Image (cartoon, rainbow, N blue to C red):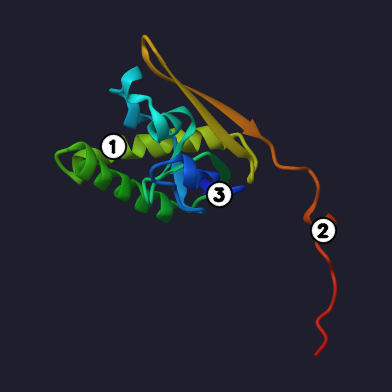
Amino acid sequence: MHLARAIHFDESDRNVFHSPARTGEWAISGGFEFSNWTEADLTGKARQAFANGWLGVETFGRVTFVAVTRIEPEEVEALTQRLAAHFVEVYGAPSPDAARPVAAEEIAQMAELCADHAPNTVLTVLRELTGAGVREQYRFIEPSEAGLDQFAIHGEVEG
């Protein structure tokens, strides 16, 4: 199974998001955060998070880019529990057990998004408010076909 991890190409996320995600943390779309938003909510850093921020599932910060990578079943379980707890703490879900199916669905949707892409494929999201709610579009940037050995310097350590 594949999921996505937060990546940073530069320091810009620290400047554009109220709370940036940590490099390497697992990430999902997190569009649920904006389900009740209106145009009036879309100002400053909140607008940036809405427009193109993925949600880190450890810090619950936002990140512009994520990369597809393999995830182990135990990690999926831990993320599901963490997200369910977040739904209780932040969104008022009645209990982790009640929130668990919704958390599992959020993670499953991200896994489905990542399923057809090779590891290291970079993903971006673009959101807009429509009359029907939040619309998300995704862009996929496939990894370079160049092999690592084209960049690595091979040598021996002298002892």
Give the residue type that dot 1 points to. Answer: Pro
* Residue 16 vertical position relative to residue 72 in the rendered view, above or below: above
Give the residue type that dot 3 points to. Answer: Glu
Residue 87 lies left or right of residue 49; in this view the side is left
Q: Position of residue 54 (x, y in %)?
A: 46, 38
Q: Which residue in the protein does label 3 denote?
A: 11
| Of pointers 3 and 2, the one earlier in the residue sequence | 3
* Residue 120 vertical position relative to residue 139 in the rendered view, above or below: below
Front residue of 98 and 34: 34
- Tell me the CA gap for discs 1 and 3: 35 Å
Q: Residues within 10 Å of mark 3 (few under 14, many from 20)?
A: few
The secondary element bearing badge 3 is classed as: loop
Residue 1 shows in the view: no
What residue is rendered at 75% in x and 43% in y? Answer: 144
Q: Which residue in the protein does label 2 denote?
A: 149
| Of pointers 1 and 2, the one earlier in the residue sequence | 1
Give the residue type that dot 2 points to. Answer: Asp
Snapshot quadrant of residue 27? top left
Q: Which residue in the protein does label 1 denote?
A: 101
Q: Position of residue 100 (x, y in %)?
A: 27, 41
Q: Position of residue 81 (x, y in %)?
A: 30, 49
| Of pointers 1 and 3, the one earlier in the residue sequence | 3
- Tell me the CA gap for discs 1 and 2: 43 Å
Q: Residues within 10 Å of mark 1 (few under 14, many from 20)?
A: few
Mark nearer the viewer, 3 or 2: 3
Q: Position of residue 127 (x, y in %)?
A: 46, 24
- Tell me the CA gap for discs 3 and 2: 28 Å
In what quadrant of the picture does the C terminus appear?
A: bottom right
